Image: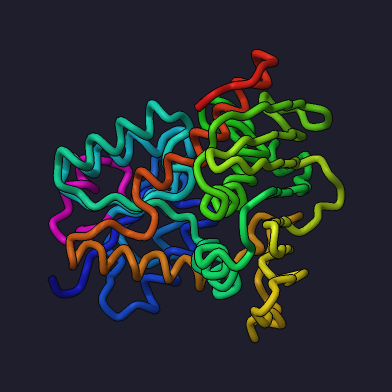
């Protein structure tokens, strides 16, 4: 395969990140974008300089598009992914892959049936700092895992939700602080700590005029015997950098805002890149993220297509965080422990 043609579904702010990545990769070319907004067609044509289509069938039948990047509303990811798979296009989807495990499973099945490579963007796995933490945990340098905590105590203004009324809804966002803002850090927690046995959640809407939670907590019981906690919010002014804590019986590591805050690993020196700054956090500004980790994800996806292999985060990996988050929502609704 030569140059890989990329089409993007959606024209929101995250699309700028994808366009920048495509422009910087030599073996990709942006072919077209799709949007349901007639107003956005004219705006996006000026901004991106490629055809902006409002007919999905026309978009998916474009012969030069090999890969479809899905960047529309979370609750519409599944329909877009299935349509793309049925059209023979490979799929790279923004998080979450879908807002329920049932919908995620439908997407996975459609891609398998049509021999399509399916990837999900959980780009925080790609940072050098996280890679160093992952390496230490995998090698057992922290010993027996005891406790893993994820804190995404962020803030979003009332205007954030008012400008896009679909945000914070079950139908289109799948939830709020956990499913939208928290999923990246929750994914990292699960990736390090392992599969979850049971959860207990407590979700509340205390500040914002939205359907789903702007403050929430969760307790996790892992299959390996460890326990964990999650706190997340979009009403926690002024918003603090996300925090990930991993404790073993031999050592511990704390990350904050994508950087290592504490490194207590006996016999293993802290990696040189712990002093790096510039890893962005969306604590108060959802646009405050760089594009380099997205670029790594896209580059890996290209390799997966060319080599006919799974990408770094396939449908089954992407399903794990959605399963835990939706179980926490169910636990909160039913006020009981939920077994996965």
**Quarter of the image holding residue 167?**
top right
Residue furthest bottom as drawn: 272
**Magenta span:** 52-67
> Where is the N terminus found, in terms of image quarters?
bottom left
Q: Which x, y percent locates residue 325? A: 57, 34
The image shows residue 173, relative to residue 185, as above or below, that is: above
Judge whether residue 301 is colored magenta.
no
Q: Is residue 243 visible?
A: yes
Q: Is residue 52 visible?
A: no
259 horizontally vs 20: left or right = right
Residue placed most toward the observer, 50 or 218: 218
Query: What's the image's color scheme?
Result: rainbow
Q: Residue at image x 83%, y 31%?
A: 207
Judge whether residue 63 is colored magenta.
yes
Residue furthest top as drawn: 334
Residue placed most toward the observer, 64 or 234: 234
Q: Which x, y percent locates residue 173? A: 55, 34
155 horizontally vs 319: left or right = right
Q: Which x, y percent locates residue 42? A: 42, 54
Q: Residue at image x 40%, y 47%?
A: 317
Q: Residue at image x 50%, y 61%?
A: 123
Residue placed most toward the observer, 213 or 151: 151
294 horizontally vs 64: left or right = right
**Quarter of the image holding residue 124?**
bottom right
């Amino acid at each position: 395969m030569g140059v890989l043609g990329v089409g993007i579904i959606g024209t929101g702010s995250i699309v700028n990140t994808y366009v920048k990545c495509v422009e910087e990769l030599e073996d990709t070319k942006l072919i077209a974008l799709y949007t349901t907004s007639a107003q956005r067609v004219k705006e996006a044509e000026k901004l991106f300089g490629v055809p902006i289509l409002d007919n999905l069938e026309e978009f998916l039948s474009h012969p030069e598009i090999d890969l479809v990047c899905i960047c529309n509303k979370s609750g519409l990811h599944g329909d877009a992914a299935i349509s793309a798979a049925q059209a023979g296009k490979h799929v790279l989807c923004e998080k979450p892959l879908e807002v329920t495990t049932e919908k995620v499973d439908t997407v996975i099945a459609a891609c398998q049936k049509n021999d399509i490579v399916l990837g999900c963007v959980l780009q925080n796995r790609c940072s050098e700092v996280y890679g160093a933490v992952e390496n230490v945990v995998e090698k057992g340098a922290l010993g027996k895992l005891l406790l893993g905590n994820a804190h995404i105590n962020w803030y979003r203004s009332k205007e954030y939700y008012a400008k896009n009324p679909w945000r914070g809804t079950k139908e289109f966002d799948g939830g709020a602080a956990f499913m939208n803002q928290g999923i990246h850090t929750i994914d990292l927690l699960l990736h390090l700590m392992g599969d979850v046995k049971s959860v207990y959640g407590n979700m509340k809407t205390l500040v914002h005029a939205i359907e789903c939670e702007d403050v929430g907590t969760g307790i996790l019981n892992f299959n390996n015997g460890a326990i964990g906690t999650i706190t997340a919010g979009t009403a926690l002014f002024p918003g603090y950098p996300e925090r990930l804590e991993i404790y073993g019986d031999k050592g511990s590591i704390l990350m904050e805002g994508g950087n290592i805050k504490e490194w207590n690993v006996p016999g293993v020196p802290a990696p040189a890149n712990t002093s790096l700054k510039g890893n962005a956090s969306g604590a108060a500004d959802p646009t405050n993220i760089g594009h380099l980790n997205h670029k790594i994800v896209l580059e890996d996806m290209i390799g997966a297509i060319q080599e006919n292999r799974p990408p770094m985060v396939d449908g089954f990996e992407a399903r794990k965080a959605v399963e835990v988050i939706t179980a926490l929502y169910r636990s909160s609704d039913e006020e009981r422990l939920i077994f996965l």
